[in-house]
Amino acid sequence: MLACRNGYHDSLTVEGRLAGGRCVTVTVEDGTIVRIEPGGSGRYVLAPAFVDPHVHLRAPGREDEETIGSGTAAAAAGGYCAILAMPNTDPVVDSAPVLRGLVETARREAVVPVGFMAAISRSLGGDELTEMGELADAGAAAFTDDGRPVVSAGLLRRALQYGAVTGRPLALHCEEPTLSRDAHVHEGAVSAELGLTGYPSVAESSMVERDLALAAYEGRPLHLMHLSARESVDALRRAREAGVEATGEVTPHHLVLTDDAVRSLDPNTKMNPPLRAADDRAALVDALRDGTIGCVATDHAPHSREEKDVPFEAAPFGVTGLETAFAALHTHLVEPGLISLETLLERMSGGPARAFGLPVPEVKVGARANLVVVDLEAEWTVTEAGFHSRSANSWLLGERLRGAVVQTVADGRLVYG
Amino acid sequence: MRHLLSIADLTRDDVERVLDGARGLDGTEPQPVLRGRLVLNVFYESSTRTSSSFDLAARRLGATTMTLKESGSSADKGESLKDTVQTLSAYGPSVLVMRHPQAGAPAFAARHTDAHVVNAGDGKHQHPTQALLDLYTMRSALGRLEGLHVAIVGDVLHSRVARSLVQALGLVGAQATLIGPPALLPRGIEALGCETSTEIAAIGDADVVYVLRMQRERMLAGASYVPSLREYTARWGITPERLRPGQKVMHPGPINRGVELDARVADGSASLVLEQVRAGLLVRMSVLQELAVGAARLQEVA
């Protein structure tokens, strides 16, 4: 299901302090952890590497913005050992030949293993199901129409039912389009002041409620992407308590920023779903802490410089995130004491891996080596020149962050550091 | 002032200075303080009064002016706003006046030019010179601004005029109440420091009833901000019967007679609409002076 460049597997040793505080030296032979011995430098933290369930690699179609090679190099620099790529490319990943082409390219280019999601509906049109069985056989990691909601409840129901055949999860972008038409920012005091059409929280949460109701009725699992509103989090919590097999993800930018940041009219504060109010942000942090939301997802969305160097209303939605996710969340959530380092590391690694049925990265003898080493003391400034991604539409440009990825080992290979 | 992009950037002193400057220009032959300078008017949206008013204001002060309208310009050929601004800036304009359908476009332009930029209306965001000329009109007609109560009636949601005016009234110690159909009162607008009501009776306490233009496209299928223009007029239209004696009526133009404003009111003694147009010229001259010459230089000239 995950594809990566072929090659040798490293034999190497990695030292660091485990989240529990123990200093260890990990020996990797042929890509597998063979020994974990006490001792070694405790200067850096050693943890299971990260898994990002939501990345736009822009290939095929917009290789000027990102390629499988550049996007996975960015992932390696961000501490990731696996990422899942979205199918809203040109052409859309809605047929087995397109998917097989991507897997082929990944075998040549991918620095870290990539799983490709396939579309739920043909051409993301929302009308007919893709050939999900064949796509699953060709290696689709999951199914999503990300970028768009599945507007038809009937079609979503059919997709949920067919999940019994594919065995792959559905990941949903929840947005009621008649409530978010022409919208650019969260509906509230900031949209009112700036005169920008508002995207109300209920445009997301009403769709979340509907999707969870369908999942409950069909008894099928569901993954909710890039949650942004307090009401959506409440709905997810209630559904999970009622036994629905639902998981959720949240992005670093929704965990750190509020719509107050939009007052700058900086196009790098424009994303879908939009940055919301302070109580929404607080609810997202709480949900990440208590596990209602089990995954951090970057929704890494590269855009060319000329596309973003325009007035706010003309700019496309989306920001990059692979190379800044850990540092941003360490700086803005862990250091102020909003969540623990252990929780952050779990929500960036095991949480997303389990939600998508991927191998869970572990620091244990016999496991494939998927490791990240981070320096919690390192301070650095986010600059355009520092990115491995082909794009630089980061919401953190010019910001100073604390915490840096020092080394990444993905599927037994040292891919960064 | 380096630019005039939003009322939110101004202090009360800035506002007083512009209004006093306009009063100083009233009834006098202006000094040609902009002689030899270029004022560019770049309009990406249709406009009659604002573009003519800026053009005339700049000429009165001795400037050379050039007005570009979107149709027929390079924007039609796909040129980016950044390239257009940089190209026009190569002529060395002193002031760039811009109207644009997107919020933040003049602020964006200001980052790519050495000229002083004046926002002549950006999307539904701001129209600062309109708010300043409205304050000038109110002060001239009522003798004060502090403590005035202004009812702003109509399509607030789509109105850059309403947003700028609420902020400007707040700066000078006046009070604003926004009145209109529920879907045309933006959620969260009270944070600007105003009250809202869906009842037209709420104009009763106001010294000034400020009427906004009601655009037909708001009734299109899928929008349905109000069920029909007829229903809008019946519930929120400003008629002589709804006004209290002594109340003044303003409108930024162009008026939809018989829709948001009854013709008898538009042509009646309560109307300050033509005073607004005259104030527009004076206030825009004052703004251009303030930006291109600066307060210090102005004193030297005097």
Image (spheres, coloured by chain):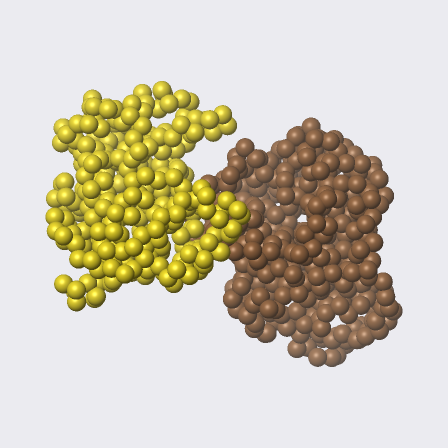
Chain colours: A brown, B yellow
> Is residue B117 depicted above or below A130 in this figure?
below
| Frontmost residue, B60 versus A321 | B60
Q: Quadrant of residue A125?
A: top right
Q: Residue at x 24, y 44 (%)?
A: B280
Q: Residue at x 82, y 43 (%)?
A: A96
Q: Position of A390 compared to B74: left or right?
A: right
Q: Tell me if I can see residue B184 in this picture.
A: yes
> Is residue B221 depicted above or below A174 in this figure?
above
Q: How many marks?
A: 0
| Frontmost residue, A187 versus A57 | A57
Q: Tell me if I can see residue B20 in this picture.
A: no
Q: Residue at x 40, y 44 (%)?
A: B69
Q: Position of B85 compared to B254: left or right?
A: right
| Frontmost residue, B139 versus B118 | B118
Report x, y in % for residue B176: 26, 41
> Is residue B201 depicted above or below A264 in this figure?
above
Report x, y in % for residue A387: 63, 66
